[in-house]
Image: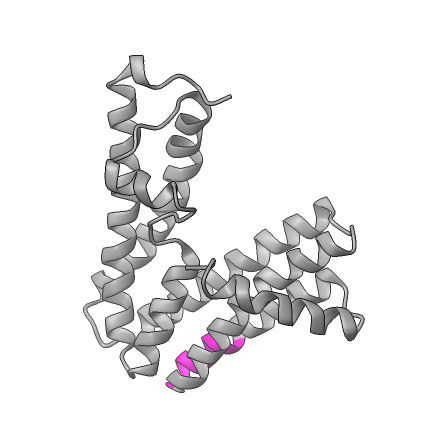
Amino acid sequence: MNRYYAHRVDPVLTWLADRLGLSPNTVTLLSLAAGLIATAAVFERQFAWAAVAIQLHHLLDGADGNLARARQMTSEFGRRLDIATDQIVRFCLFGSLALVAQLPAWLGVAMMATLYLDIALVAWVVRPCMQRHRLVRSRWKQWFMDRGLMPGFDIFTLYLIVSLCLLAGSPEAAVIMVTILKTIDWSYRLKECWTTMRHPHRNAPER
């Protein structure tokens, strides 16, 4: 998704930030501000504005790294700031959707649970498996990867889906879609790890 959308728009925001003399960390904080504005807009049921602010957050989140690399200003502090602001926005935005959507409370809890379960599984299961073994991929997925595409529902794809649901005036659809798609996403990645571990002769570590 980023390849055909965000990566085509990010350079414009990166250029603008550079012309304005903004530092990469300032752009990161602007990304945080956009995410919090989106959260406030959801609470106020201004869903169209929330959708716009979500996409602005997404694009600025890419522009800060682009700017840091272009100026050779990458730093550990900047990396940590970027991670922290991303997590703040993620918690606030999806939390606001869970609270505003007119759905049973358990659905909101399920959405938050599957989002954070995904983070934990990637850190504790998927990434260690990838570091030790060459994952056994399904043919259809390998077909996409051979063409530079990674099928899945990463956070930025979820942001796009949420924005579209909000433009349609339905935070309820956003909660349901995120819950289902993210659960499918981490379940499939676990399946890949399980398949890989069951075929030790096929999973030599990547060099």
Q: Is residue 140 left or right of residue 52?
A: left
Which residue is more in the foreground, 155 or 117?
A: 155
Q: Splitting the image into 4 quarters, where does residue 28 fall?
A: bottom right
**Residue plotted at (38% across, 60% down):** 157
Magenta-colored span: 37-45
**Residue plotted at (70% across, 69% down):** 15
Q: Is residue 110 visible?
A: no
- Residue that protrudes farthest toward the front in the picture: 147
Q: Position of residue 183 (x, y in %)?
A: 26, 50
Query: Vertically, is 34 above or below 139?
Result: below
**Residue plotted at (63% across, 63% down):** 63
Q: Position of residue 203 (x, y in %)?
A: 35, 19
How many labels sit on residues? 0
Query: Vertically, is 171 above or below 128?
Result: below
**Residue plotted at (32% across, 38% down):** 142
Query: Vertically, is 120 above or below 172?
Result: above
- What kind of secondary structure does the magenta stretch mostly adopt? helix
Which residue is more in the foreground, 100 or 47?
A: 47
Which residue is more in the foreground, 144 or 196?
A: 144
Q: Splitting the image into 4 quarters, where does residue 94 fall?
A: bottom left
- Residue that protrudes farthest toward the top in the picture: 201
Q: Position of residue 165 (x, y in %)?
A: 30, 75
Q: In what quadrant of the picture does the N terminus appear?
A: bottom left
Which residue is more in the foreground, 114 or 158?
A: 158
Query: Vertically, is 60 above or below 194?
Result: below
Q: Position of residue 161 (x, y in %)?
A: 33, 68
Q: Splitting the image into 4 quarters, where does residue 57 fall?
A: bottom right
Q: Is residue 151 visible?
A: yes
